[in-house]
Image (cartoon, rainbow, N blue to C red):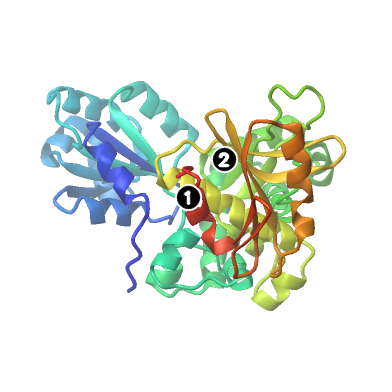
Amino acid sequence: MKTILRDIAQYAKKIATQFPVVSIQGPRQSGKTTLARTLFQNYGYVNLEHPDTRAEAEADGASFLRLHPAPLIIDEVQRIPSLLSRIQVAVDEHPGENGQYILTGSHQPALQSSVGQSLAGRVGGLTLLPLSLAELTAAGIRSERESRIVEGFMPRLFSEHQSSLELYRNYAATYLEKDVSQLTRLRERRPFETYIRLLAGRVGQLYNSAGISDETGVSAPTLRGWLSILEACHLVFVLPSYYRNFGKRFVKTPKVYFTEPGLATWQLGIRDSRQVVRDPAFGGLFENMVVVEALKTRLNAGRTPDLYFIRDQHGTEIDLVVEDGRALHLFEIKSSTSFSTDFTRNLDVVRRAIPEVASATVVYGGDSAAAVRDIEFVPFRDLAARMRQLGLA
C-alpha cells in the first residue's frame, strides 16, 4: 500500500488547536477517514456506518458519548445529526479544550444545517477532495495528461490498485444512484442519470439550464435542486462568472465541473486514454482537471476558493480567475502539449480591460515552463506550485 501524504494535513492539525470540534467533509472515498486516523492516532474511533454502532448512538446519545469519551473520531456523522447537540453539551463542559472531536461526513444539506445550528462557534471545518496532481507528484507518481483524466484521483486507485473502471462503476451505482437519488426523492431515476451525463458532456461550457431541461424533460426548478444537492455532496463544483463592477459586458452564467474528473469521463463512456484524446469533450475534460486542481490547492491551504471565470459578450474568455483581495490572477487553460503565443490573446485583451489583474498564466498540457513577455506558461502538473509562487496557497 502506497502512503500519499495529504497537503491539507497541516491545516487540519492547525484548526484542531483552535476549535473543540473539527469537521472533515468531502465526497465519498476522498480519504477523510484515512486523514483523520493518520493525523489523530491517539484518538478513539467509531464509525456510524456500522449498524450496531449506529443503533447504539441513536438509542441514547448521551450514554454513547460517555462510553466513547473524547478525544474521539466519529466517522460518517451525517448518519445521526441529532448526535451533534450531544457533542455541543460535551465540549461546553470542557471549555478551552480544543481538538476534542474529529467528525467526518459526506456533506449533505441536512448535515450542514445541523452543524451550523448545534456547533456554531465550536467547529472548524475543512473540505477534503480526492488526491491532487501536486500530491501525486510529491509521492513520485507521474501523471500523464490522458491517463489521469480517465483514471482520476480517488485514493483507492493508488492505495489498493483498484481498477478505475470498477471503481467508477461501483461509485455510480452506490452513491449517485442510491445516496444522491434518495436525497433528490426521485420518482424516476432515468432523467437524473441523463442529467449527470449531460453535465459530464458539458464541462467547460456555460451551464444552459433551459437546454438541459429540454433534453431531460425536467423542469428548471427541479434541475436547480439537483444541482444544489450534487454541489452539497461535493460531487460537482459550480464555477461562477466574475462580473462585478463590469456592467453588462460580461456574462453571469456559471459553469459546472466534476470534483472527480475520472467520474465525468466514466459517465461519458470513455474507458481508455486513447479514446479520451479523440473525444470532442477532451478539451473540457482537461479544463475540468485543471480547475479542480486549483480548487484543491485553495482548500488544502485552508483558503476559500474565490475561483471564477470571465467571459464577455463577444466570446472572449479566461478559463480561471483567482481573486486575492482586490487583485485578480488570470489562468488560461489549453490542453495542447505544445505552447503557442496565440494562447495569450485573451489574456492580453482582459488585462487591457481590467486594471486589477496582477498576473497572467497559461496552463497547458505539455512538460516545459516558459515565459512570453510577462505571461508564464506552466505544465498542468505545476499549477499548484505556480499558485504558491503567486501567494495564492
Q: Quadrant of residue 228?
A: top right
Q: Residue furthest bottom?
A: 274
Is 76 on the left-hand or right-hand side of 19?
right
Question: In the image, which disc is placed on residue 389?
Answer: 1
Give how far across and how far down residue 177 sits, in percent: 58, 52
Give how far across and how far down residue 201 sits, in percent: 74, 55
Please state, as top left, top right, bottom left or bottom right, where the N terminus lies in the image.
bottom left
| Labels 2, 1: front one | 1
Judged from the image, the secondary structure of the residue bearing numbered disc 2 is helix
**Residue lying at 56% horizontally and 59% vertically, measured from the top left:** 173
Q: How many marks?
A: 2
Q: Amino acid at mark 2?
A: Glu
Please state, as top left, top right, bottom left or bottom right, where the C terminus lies in the image.
top left
Say above or below: 196 vs 228. Answer: below
Is 384 on the left-hand or right-hand side of 45?
right
Question: In the image, which disc is placed on residue 231?
Answer: 2
**Residue lying at 31% horizontally and 50% vertically, measured from the top left:** 9
**Residue lying at 60% horizontally and 55% vertically, measured from the top left:** 290
Give how far across and how far down residue 16 sits, in percent: 24, 38
Q: Residues within 10 Å of mark 1 (few under 14, many from 20)?
A: few
Give how far across and how far down residue 179 sits, in percent: 51, 47
Is 324 on the left-hand or right-hand side of 332?
left
Say above or below: 259 vs 219. Answer: below
**Residue lying at 65% horizontally and 73% vertically, measured from the top left:** 271
The answer to whether the residue labelled 2 contacts the one labelled 1, judged by CB atoms less than 8 Å apart, is no
Q: Earlier in the sequence, mark 2 or mark 1?
A: 2
> For this rendering, which residue is in front, 276 or 175?
276
Q: Give the Cα separation between the discs numbered 2 and 1.
A: 29 Å
Judged from the image, the secondary structure of the residue bearing numbered disc 1 is helix
